[in-house]
Image (cartoon, coloured by chain):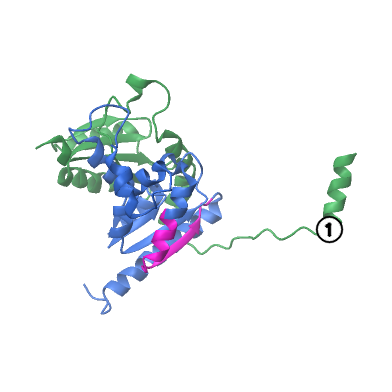
Amino acid sequence: MKIAIFPPNSLILADLVERKGHEPLVLQKEIRKKVTDPEIDSPPFNITEEEPIKGLKYAAIEVPSGIRGRMAIFGPLIEAAEAAIIMEDAPFGFGCIGCARTNELCMYFLRKQGIPVLELHYPETREETMEVVNQINAFLDGLEAKDDPKGGD
Amino acid sequence: MSEEDKVTRMIILGPAAQVSQSQVVGELHMLELPLTIKSTCYGAVVHGKEEDVLTAIREIRKLDPANIFTKDRGFPPGDPRRCRAKRGGAREGFHQLEKEFELLGFVGEALEWPEPVEIKKHGKISPEDFKKIAEECEK
């Protein structure tokens, strides 16, 4: 199954999803399409004026172009998702999630998709991390069971 | 094959990993796959055809399944837009990796020896205790 993760660039989430045989919908895959496109070769830019226009599908014209530009990249990932894991309160060092309004919009869209969603808080201690890993594994096992109701191979 | 069809993966060793970066890079070379392999402080970066990269990841995980983590990377290795050698300072994404690395030991432990845990929730402080603390601070 295609699993959207939030933060969309999280190493821990992507790795845990992949270990269970699912496909994590990570931001880096979308970014790769942008940065290896021969038409975009002028660093540091890796998006064009097209992105805020594409972002109109997810946010109104009054919304800042930065949010619309980000949504043009996050949006296709959200649409492709069959399930989602949201980890709130991630540290600010998480690069691309520095825009709080985009984060809120992404989480809103994921919750509105009508797909199974697991919501967690960013762990800070050993116990919290163990609990997060247990919850993610249980959630992913539950998805497998739903996917294959007979429980066979 | 064009550069657009190639993928890049970061291999990150957890703090409790039983293998070193050089061992990982050595093993990757021994696989004899057509990949670009770069040794880094956190593990390695592999770049090449998707199927070769995934084969390399699968094989390298066998060295220490609970403590070898992998993550996609958008930019190819040594890309002047991201490479530290060209720009100076920390690469974008480094601080995130640094933050997540702090938890990788616990994640590895949870994967190797899963156990139910009980999280203590912090209760509310009573007005008496709060008053005592405030008085101590005033001294």
Q: Which region of the structure is painted magenta? A: A106-123
- Kind of residue at disc 1: Pro
The answer to whether residue A18 is left or right of residue A138 is left
Residue in the image at 33% along x and 33% along y? B21
Does B64 appear in magenta?
A: no
Query: Chain letter of disc 1?
Result: B
Front residue of A144/A64: it is A64
* Chain identifier for the blue-coloured part of the image: A
* Chain identifier for the green-coloured part of the image: B
Residue A93: where, in percent of width, then height? 48, 38
Whether residue A97 can be seen here: yes
Residue B110: where, in percent of width, then height? 45, 55
In which quadrant of the rendered view does residue B10 lie? top left
Residue B54: where, in percent of width, then height? 21, 47
Whether residue B63 can be seen here: no
Residue in the image at 26% along x and 33% along y? B25
Residue in the image at 88% along x and 40% along y? B138
Name the residue tied to disc 1: B127
